[in-house]
Amino acid sequence: MTVPVLQVKNLYKLFIPLEHSQNEKKAMAMLEQGASRTEVQEATGITAGLIDINFTVNKGEVFVLIGLSGSGKSTLIRCLNMLNPPTSGTVYLEGDNITDFSSKQLQELRRTKVAMVFQNFGLISNRNVLENTYYGLEIRGVPLKERTEKAMQMLEMVALQGWEKTRISALSGGMKQRVGIARALANDPDILLMDEAFSALDPLVRNDLQFELLRIQEKTGKTIVFITHDINEAFRLGTHVGILRDGRMVQIGTPEEMITNPADDYVRSFINNADSSKIFTVRNVMSTQTCIVRNIDGAAVALRNMKNSGVSSAYVVDEHLRFIGIITLDSAMQVLSGYTTFDKSILRNVPVIDNLDTPVADIMPLSASTPFPLPVIDDNKLFCGIVTKASVISSFVTN
Protein backbone atom coordinates (compact mmCIF):
# COMPACT_ATOMS: atom_id res chain seq x y z
CA MET A 1 0.00 0.00 0.00
CA THR A 2 1.37 3.41 -0.99
CA VAL A 3 1.92 5.76 1.93
CA PRO A 4 0.52 9.29 1.33
CA VAL A 5 3.07 12.09 1.30
CA LEU A 6 0.94 14.04 3.77
CA GLN A 7 -1.87 12.96 6.05
CA VAL A 8 -3.71 15.11 8.58
CA LYS A 9 -5.91 13.46 11.21
CA ASN A 10 -8.31 15.10 13.69
CA LEU A 11 -6.30 18.33 13.79
CA TYR A 12 -7.30 21.09 16.20
CA LYS A 13 -5.55 24.39 16.81
CA LEU A 14 -6.70 26.58 19.69
CA PHE A 15 -5.38 30.05 20.45
CA ILE A 16 -5.49 30.19 24.23
CA PRO A 17 -4.89 33.44 26.14
CA LEU A 18 -3.00 32.81 29.37
CA GLU A 19 -5.89 34.08 31.48
CA HIS A 20 -8.22 31.47 29.89
CA SER A 21 -5.84 28.48 29.88
CA GLN A 22 -7.99 26.66 32.42
CA ASN A 23 -10.79 26.51 29.82
CA GLU A 24 -8.90 24.43 27.24
CA LYS A 25 -10.63 21.14 28.04
CA LYS A 26 -14.03 22.84 28.05
CA ALA A 27 -13.34 24.41 24.66
CA MET A 28 -12.24 21.07 23.18
CA ALA A 29 -15.33 19.34 24.55
CA MET A 30 -17.62 21.98 23.06
CA LEU A 31 -15.93 21.72 19.65
CA GLU A 32 -16.16 17.93 19.66
CA GLN A 33 -19.89 18.28 20.35
CA GLY A 34 -20.30 20.54 17.31
CA ALA A 35 -20.15 24.02 18.87
CA SER A 36 -19.23 26.87 16.54
CA ARG A 37 -16.11 28.99 16.81
CA THR A 38 -18.20 31.93 18.05
CA GLU A 39 -19.92 29.85 20.73
CA VAL A 40 -16.59 28.56 22.03
CA GLN A 41 -15.10 32.06 22.04
CA GLU A 42 -18.00 33.49 24.01
CA ALA A 43 -18.06 30.63 26.53
CA THR A 44 -14.33 30.14 27.11
CA GLY A 45 -12.41 33.13 25.75
CA ILE A 46 -10.51 30.71 23.48
CA THR A 47 -10.34 31.06 19.68
CA ALA A 48 -10.61 27.87 17.64
CA GLY A 49 -8.31 28.31 14.65
CA LEU A 50 -8.81 24.79 13.29
CA ILE A 51 -11.50 22.25 14.16
CA ASP A 52 -11.17 18.51 13.42
CA ILE A 53 -9.30 18.81 10.12
CA ASN A 54 -8.75 15.62 8.11
CA PHE A 55 -7.25 15.21 4.65
CA THR A 56 -4.68 13.26 2.65
CA VAL A 57 -2.29 14.44 -0.07
CA ASN A 58 -0.72 11.89 -2.40
CA LYS A 59 2.66 12.11 -4.11
CA GLY A 60 2.74 14.54 -7.04
CA GLU A 61 -0.62 16.09 -6.16
CA VAL A 62 -1.45 19.80 -6.03
CA PHE A 63 -3.79 20.15 -3.06
CA VAL A 64 -5.37 23.60 -2.80
CA LEU A 65 -6.87 25.00 0.40
CA ILE A 66 -9.31 27.84 -0.14
CA GLY A 67 -11.37 30.02 2.15
CA LEU A 68 -12.18 33.58 3.12
CA SER A 69 -10.02 35.64 5.47
CA GLY A 70 -10.09 34.11 8.95
CA SER A 71 -11.17 30.67 7.72
CA GLY A 72 -7.97 29.03 9.00
CA LYS A 73 -5.97 28.61 5.76
CA SER A 74 -2.69 30.12 6.92
CA THR A 75 -3.01 28.55 10.36
CA LEU A 76 -3.42 25.14 8.75
CA ILE A 77 -0.49 25.40 6.34
CA ARG A 78 1.77 26.40 9.24
CA CYS A 79 0.67 23.31 11.14
CA LEU A 80 1.97 21.19 8.26
CA ASN A 81 5.57 22.10 9.08
CA MET A 82 4.95 22.70 12.79
CA LEU A 83 5.50 26.45 12.68
CA ASN A 84 2.07 26.37 14.33
CA PRO A 85 2.10 23.27 16.58
CA PRO A 86 -1.46 21.88 16.72
CA THR A 87 -3.32 21.65 20.02
CA SER A 88 -4.29 18.06 19.23
CA GLY A 89 -4.32 15.69 16.30
CA THR A 90 -1.54 14.37 14.10
CA VAL A 91 0.32 15.32 10.93
CA TYR A 92 2.09 12.50 9.09
CA LEU A 93 4.78 13.18 6.51
CA GLU A 94 5.60 10.06 4.51
CA GLY A 95 4.28 7.98 7.39
CA ASP A 96 6.21 9.78 10.15
CA ASN A 97 4.22 11.55 12.86
CA ILE A 98 5.94 14.93 12.83
CA THR A 99 3.82 16.22 15.72
CA ASP A 100 6.11 14.08 17.93
CA PHE A 101 9.34 15.41 16.40
CA SER A 102 11.94 17.15 18.56
CA SER A 103 13.08 20.69 17.79
CA LYS A 104 16.19 19.31 16.10
CA GLN A 105 14.13 16.92 13.96
CA LEU A 106 11.76 19.73 12.95
CA GLN A 107 14.69 21.95 11.98
CA GLU A 108 16.04 19.20 9.73
CA LEU A 109 12.54 18.62 8.33
CA ARG A 110 12.21 22.27 7.28
CA ARG A 111 15.67 22.29 5.76
CA THR A 112 15.34 19.14 3.69
CA LYS A 113 11.77 17.83 3.33
CA VAL A 114 9.33 20.74 3.51
CA ALA A 115 9.86 24.12 1.85
CA MET A 116 7.63 27.17 2.05
CA VAL A 117 6.91 30.03 -0.37
CA PHE A 118 5.42 33.15 1.21
CA GLN A 119 3.11 35.85 -0.13
CA ASN A 120 5.61 38.62 0.74
CA PHE A 121 8.47 36.75 -0.98
CA GLY A 122 10.70 36.51 2.15
CA LEU A 123 13.89 37.28 0.22
CA ILE A 124 17.09 38.69 1.72
CA SER A 125 17.53 42.22 0.39
CA ASN A 126 21.32 42.40 0.63
CA ARG A 127 21.82 39.23 -1.43
CA ASN A 128 21.49 38.90 -5.17
CA VAL A 129 19.21 36.46 -6.99
CA LEU A 130 21.73 33.61 -7.01
CA GLU A 131 22.68 34.06 -3.35
CA ASN A 132 19.02 34.07 -2.33
CA THR A 133 18.38 30.93 -4.36
CA TYR A 134 21.16 28.88 -2.77
CA TYR A 135 20.64 30.27 0.76
CA GLY A 136 19.02 27.10 2.08
CA LEU A 137 21.81 24.97 0.65
CA GLU A 138 24.38 27.30 2.21
CA ILE A 139 22.81 26.82 5.64
CA ARG A 140 23.04 23.07 5.15
CA GLY A 141 26.77 23.37 4.46
CA VAL A 142 26.65 22.48 0.76
CA PRO A 143 29.92 23.55 -0.96
CA LEU A 144 29.80 26.75 -3.04
CA LYS A 145 30.31 25.07 -6.42
CA GLU A 146 27.60 22.47 -5.80
CA ARG A 147 25.04 24.92 -4.44
CA THR A 148 25.73 27.37 -7.28
CA GLU A 149 25.13 24.67 -9.89
CA LYS A 150 21.90 23.60 -8.20
CA ALA A 151 20.69 27.18 -7.86
CA MET A 152 21.42 27.91 -11.52
CA GLN A 153 19.36 24.88 -12.54
CA MET A 154 16.42 26.15 -10.51
CA LEU A 155 16.73 29.69 -11.89
CA GLU A 156 16.62 28.29 -15.39
CA MET A 157 13.50 26.32 -14.46
CA VAL A 158 11.72 29.50 -13.35
CA ALA A 159 12.95 31.44 -16.42
CA LEU A 160 15.41 33.67 -14.54
CA GLN A 161 18.61 32.59 -16.23
CA GLY A 162 20.76 35.68 -16.80
CA TRP A 163 19.36 37.42 -13.71
CA GLU A 164 21.49 35.60 -11.14
CA LYS A 165 23.70 38.62 -10.27
CA THR A 166 20.78 41.06 -10.05
CA ARG A 167 19.95 42.70 -6.74
CA ILE A 168 16.56 41.82 -5.29
CA SER A 169 15.50 45.48 -5.22
CA ALA A 170 15.76 45.61 -9.02
CA LEU A 171 13.19 42.84 -9.57
CA SER A 172 9.46 43.10 -10.19
CA GLY A 173 7.02 41.36 -7.85
CA GLY A 174 6.58 38.45 -10.24
CA MET A 175 10.32 37.98 -10.59
CA LYS A 176 10.78 38.09 -6.81
CA GLN A 177 8.24 35.31 -6.43
CA ARG A 178 10.05 33.27 -9.07
CA VAL A 179 13.19 33.60 -6.94
CA GLY A 180 11.19 32.42 -3.93
CA ILE A 181 10.02 29.36 -5.84
CA ALA A 182 13.54 28.64 -7.10
CA ARG A 183 14.93 28.92 -3.56
CA ALA A 184 12.31 26.50 -2.25
CA LEU A 185 12.99 23.99 -5.04
CA ALA A 186 16.78 24.20 -4.63
CA ASN A 187 16.55 22.19 -1.42
CA ASP A 188 14.74 19.41 -3.33
CA PRO A 189 11.94 19.14 -0.75
CA ASP A 190 9.36 16.36 -0.73
CA ILE A 191 6.56 18.88 -0.34
CA LEU A 192 6.16 22.55 -1.22
CA LEU A 193 3.89 24.76 0.90
CA MET A 194 2.68 27.95 -0.80
CA ASP A 195 0.78 30.44 1.37
CA GLU A 196 -1.12 32.80 -0.98
CA ALA A 197 2.13 32.98 -2.94
CA PHE A 198 0.58 34.86 -5.89
CA SER A 199 -1.99 37.00 -4.08
CA ALA A 200 0.16 40.16 -3.95
CA LEU A 201 0.78 40.15 -7.72
CA ASP A 202 -1.19 41.91 -10.44
CA PRO A 203 -3.64 39.68 -12.36
CA LEU A 204 -1.57 39.17 -15.51
CA VAL A 205 1.61 38.27 -13.62
CA ARG A 206 -0.42 36.08 -11.29
CA ASN A 207 -1.95 34.13 -14.16
CA ASP A 208 1.47 33.77 -15.74
CA LEU A 209 2.92 32.27 -12.56
CA GLN A 210 -0.02 29.92 -12.13
CA PHE A 211 0.73 28.41 -15.51
CA GLU A 212 4.46 28.32 -14.75
CA LEU A 213 3.79 26.54 -11.48
CA LEU A 214 1.90 23.80 -13.33
CA ARG A 215 4.81 23.47 -15.75
CA ILE A 216 7.32 23.26 -12.88
CA GLN A 217 5.20 20.71 -11.05
CA GLU A 218 5.02 18.61 -14.20
CA LYS A 219 8.80 18.73 -14.60
CA THR A 220 9.65 17.99 -10.96
CA GLY A 221 6.70 15.89 -9.77
CA LYS A 222 6.68 17.82 -6.50
CA THR A 223 3.79 17.55 -4.08
CA ILE A 224 2.32 21.01 -3.46
CA VAL A 225 -0.09 22.40 -0.88
CA PHE A 226 -1.31 25.77 -2.14
CA ILE A 227 -3.32 28.36 -0.19
CA THR A 228 -5.59 30.85 -1.95
CA HIS A 229 -8.80 32.83 -1.54
CA ASP A 230 -9.52 32.72 -5.29
CA ILE A 231 -11.77 29.90 -6.46
CA ASN A 232 -10.58 30.27 -10.06
CA GLU A 233 -6.98 29.88 -8.99
CA ALA A 234 -7.92 26.88 -6.86
CA PHE A 235 -9.72 25.11 -9.70
CA ARG A 236 -6.97 25.87 -12.20
CA LEU A 237 -4.17 24.53 -10.01
CA GLY A 238 -5.74 21.91 -7.78
CA THR A 239 -5.90 18.18 -8.29
CA HIS A 240 -8.07 18.28 -5.18
CA VAL A 241 -9.46 21.33 -3.41
CA GLY A 242 -10.43 21.76 0.24
CA ILE A 243 -12.78 24.58 1.27
CA LEU A 244 -12.42 25.97 4.81
CA ARG A 245 -15.02 27.92 6.74
CA ASP A 246 -14.62 29.17 10.31
CA GLY A 247 -11.89 26.65 11.04
CA ARG A 248 -13.72 23.61 9.67
CA MET A 249 -13.19 21.77 6.39
CA VAL A 250 -16.50 22.12 4.57
CA GLN A 251 -15.72 19.97 1.53
CA ILE A 252 -12.81 18.21 -0.17
CA GLY A 253 -13.00 17.06 -3.76
CA THR A 254 -11.94 17.55 -7.34
CA PRO A 255 -13.12 20.69 -9.14
CA GLU A 256 -15.57 18.50 -11.07
CA GLU A 257 -17.04 17.05 -7.84
CA MET A 258 -17.46 20.48 -6.27
CA ILE A 259 -19.20 21.93 -9.32
CA THR A 260 -21.56 18.99 -9.77
CA ASN A 261 -22.14 18.17 -6.10
CA PRO A 262 -21.41 21.09 -3.72
CA ALA A 263 -21.64 20.05 -0.09
CA ASP A 264 -23.88 22.93 0.99
CA ASP A 265 -25.11 26.41 0.11
CA TYR A 266 -21.84 27.96 1.31
CA VAL A 267 -19.81 25.96 -1.19
CA ARG A 268 -22.39 26.60 -3.91
CA SER A 269 -22.26 30.34 -3.23
CA PHE A 270 -18.48 30.28 -3.13
CA ILE A 271 -18.34 28.72 -6.57
CA ASN A 272 -21.10 30.82 -8.14
CA ASN A 273 -19.63 34.11 -6.95
CA ALA A 274 -16.15 33.43 -8.33
CA ASP A 275 -14.70 36.09 -10.57
CA SER A 276 -13.93 35.27 -14.18
CA SER A 277 -10.37 34.31 -14.99
CA LYS A 278 -8.37 36.34 -17.45
CA ILE A 279 -5.80 35.33 -19.98
CA PHE A 280 -2.14 35.90 -19.33
CA THR A 281 0.71 36.69 -21.74
CA VAL A 282 4.00 34.79 -22.06
CA ARG A 283 6.23 35.99 -24.85
CA ASN A 284 5.73 37.80 -28.14
CA VAL A 285 2.18 37.30 -29.47
CA MET A 286 1.45 34.12 -27.54
CA SER A 287 -0.88 34.31 -24.61
CA THR A 288 -1.77 31.58 -22.18
CA GLN A 289 -5.35 30.35 -22.26
CA THR A 290 -7.33 30.56 -19.04
CA CYS A 291 -9.96 28.22 -20.44
CA ILE A 292 -8.04 24.98 -19.93
CA VAL A 293 -9.55 21.69 -18.81
CA ARG A 294 -7.89 18.39 -18.03
CA ASN A 295 -9.30 15.30 -19.68
CA ILE A 296 -9.95 13.87 -16.19
CA ASP A 297 -12.05 16.90 -15.14
CA GLY A 298 -15.08 16.41 -17.36
CA ALA A 299 -17.71 18.48 -19.12
CA ALA A 300 -18.98 20.40 -16.06
CA VAL A 301 -15.56 21.92 -15.42
CA ALA A 302 -15.20 22.70 -19.13
CA LEU A 303 -18.53 24.53 -19.18
CA ARG A 304 -17.73 26.53 -16.06
CA ASN A 305 -14.32 27.56 -17.40
CA MET A 306 -15.89 28.65 -20.68
CA LYS A 307 -18.51 30.70 -18.84
CA ASN A 308 -15.94 32.43 -16.63
CA SER A 309 -13.64 33.11 -19.59
CA GLY A 310 -16.43 34.29 -21.86
CA VAL A 311 -15.52 31.84 -24.63
CA SER A 312 -17.23 28.98 -26.41
CA SER A 313 -14.39 26.45 -26.45
CA ALA A 314 -11.86 24.97 -24.02
CA TYR A 315 -8.41 23.48 -24.55
CA VAL A 316 -8.11 19.92 -23.28
CA VAL A 317 -4.82 18.62 -21.82
CA ASP A 318 -3.87 15.34 -20.17
CA GLU A 319 -2.48 14.88 -16.67
CA HIS A 320 0.99 15.74 -17.98
CA LEU A 321 -0.27 19.00 -19.61
CA ARG A 322 0.13 17.53 -23.09
CA PHE A 323 -2.33 19.04 -25.55
CA ILE A 324 -5.15 16.68 -26.61
CA GLY A 325 -7.66 18.82 -28.46
CA ILE A 326 -10.55 21.26 -28.15
CA ILE A 327 -14.05 20.87 -26.73
CA THR A 328 -16.76 23.32 -27.73
CA LEU A 329 -19.63 24.67 -25.66
CA ASP A 330 -22.18 22.73 -27.72
CA SER A 331 -20.19 19.48 -27.36
CA ALA A 332 -19.92 19.89 -23.60
CA MET A 333 -23.68 20.41 -23.37
CA GLN A 334 -24.18 17.23 -25.41
CA VAL A 335 -22.01 15.33 -22.90
CA LEU A 336 -24.02 16.59 -19.93
CA SER A 337 -27.22 15.65 -21.73
CA GLY A 338 -25.97 12.10 -22.12
CA TYR A 339 -25.76 12.07 -25.92
CA THR A 340 -22.02 11.40 -26.04
CA THR A 341 -18.95 11.00 -23.84
CA PHE A 342 -16.41 13.63 -22.90
CA ASP A 343 -13.65 11.73 -24.70
CA LYS A 344 -15.60 11.45 -27.94
CA SER A 345 -16.56 15.14 -27.88
CA ILE A 346 -12.95 16.37 -28.12
CA LEU A 347 -11.85 17.78 -31.49
CA ARG A 348 -8.41 16.23 -31.96
CA ASN A 349 -7.39 17.08 -35.52
CA VAL A 350 -6.87 20.79 -34.95
CA PRO A 351 -3.85 22.69 -36.32
CA VAL A 352 -1.16 23.53 -33.78
CA ILE A 353 2.00 25.64 -33.63
CA ASP A 354 4.84 23.36 -32.54
CA ASN A 355 7.69 25.87 -32.55
CA LEU A 356 7.77 28.84 -30.16
CA ASP A 357 10.21 30.63 -32.49
CA THR A 358 7.98 30.52 -35.57
CA PRO A 359 7.77 34.01 -37.13
CA VAL A 360 4.36 35.65 -36.80
CA ALA A 361 4.20 36.19 -40.56
CA ASP A 362 4.41 32.42 -41.08
CA ILE A 363 1.33 31.67 -38.97
CA MET A 364 -0.91 34.47 -40.27
CA PRO A 365 -2.54 32.38 -43.04
CA LEU A 366 -3.16 29.50 -40.63
CA SER A 367 -4.60 31.84 -38.00
CA ALA A 368 -6.95 33.45 -40.53
CA SER A 369 -8.34 30.10 -41.71
CA THR A 370 -8.90 28.52 -38.27
CA PRO A 371 -12.10 29.08 -36.23
CA PHE A 372 -10.24 28.69 -32.91
CA PRO A 373 -7.19 30.46 -31.47
CA LEU A 374 -4.16 28.36 -32.41
CA PRO A 375 -2.81 26.14 -29.63
CA VAL A 376 0.96 26.27 -29.06
CA ILE A 377 2.91 23.19 -27.93
CA ASP A 378 6.59 22.59 -27.19
CA ASP A 379 8.91 19.77 -28.24
CA ASN A 380 7.33 17.46 -25.66
CA LYS A 381 3.80 18.33 -26.83
CA LEU A 382 3.16 20.24 -23.61
CA PHE A 383 0.51 22.91 -23.98
CA CYS A 384 2.16 26.37 -23.82
CA GLY A 385 -0.64 28.77 -24.77
CA ILE A 386 -2.55 30.16 -27.72
CA VAL A 387 -2.21 32.66 -30.54
CA THR A 388 -5.37 34.62 -31.36
CA LYS A 389 -6.22 36.36 -34.62
CA ALA A 390 -6.26 39.67 -32.74
CA SER A 391 -2.76 39.15 -31.34
CA VAL A 392 -1.39 38.32 -34.79
CA ILE A 393 -2.99 41.38 -36.37
CA SER A 394 -1.94 43.61 -33.45
CA SER A 395 1.67 42.57 -33.83
CA PHE A 396 1.66 43.91 -37.37
CA VAL A 397 -0.11 47.13 -36.40
CA THR A 398 2.28 47.75 -33.49
CA ASN A 399 5.36 47.06 -35.53
Image: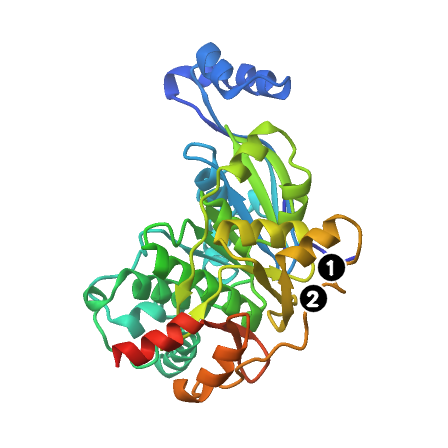
Query: Could you say whether the residue bearing mark 1 is in a helix, strand or loop?
Result: loop
Q: Which residue is mark 1?
A: 342
Q: Which residue is mark 2?
A: 346
Residue 57, image x, y percentages: 63, 51
Q: Report the residue that reaches farthest toward the top.
A: 43
Image quarter where the N terminus lies is: bottom right
Image quarter where the C terminus lies is: bottom left
**Residue at x 56% of width, y 64% of height:** 222
Relative to 312, say whether 30 is above or below.
above
* 149 left or right, relative to 192: left
**Residue at x 50% of width, y 49% of height:** 308
Q: Using the rendered image of the protein, determine whether residue 86 is visible from the camera's viewpoint.
A: no
Given residues 248 and 362, the one toward you in this image is 362
Q: Report the residue that reaches farthest toward the front.
A: 369
Query: Could you say whether the residue bearing mark 2 is in a helix, strand or loop?
Result: loop
Residue 125, image x, y percentages: 21, 62
Q: Residue 152, located in which quarter of the rendered image?
A: bottom left
**Residue at x 39% of width, y 70% of height:** 390
Q: CA distance from mark 1 to mark 2?
A: 7 Å
Q: Amino acid at mark 1?
A: Phe
Given residues 222 and 368, the one toward you in this image is 368
Given residues 369 and 32, the one toward you in this image is 369
Residue 265, image x, y percentages: 59, 28
Q: Amino acid at mark 2?
A: Ile
Q: Residues within 10 Å of mark 1 (few under 14, many from 20)?
A: many
Given residues 94 and 399, the one toward you in this image is 399
Q: Residue 224, located in which quarter of the rendered image?
A: bottom right
Q: Are marks 1 and 2 in contact (CB under 8 Å)?
A: yes
**Residue at x 58% of width, y 34% of height:** 268
Q: Using the rendered image of the protein, determine whether residue 293 is visible from the camera's viewpoint.
A: yes
Relative to 235, say whether 393 is above or below.
below
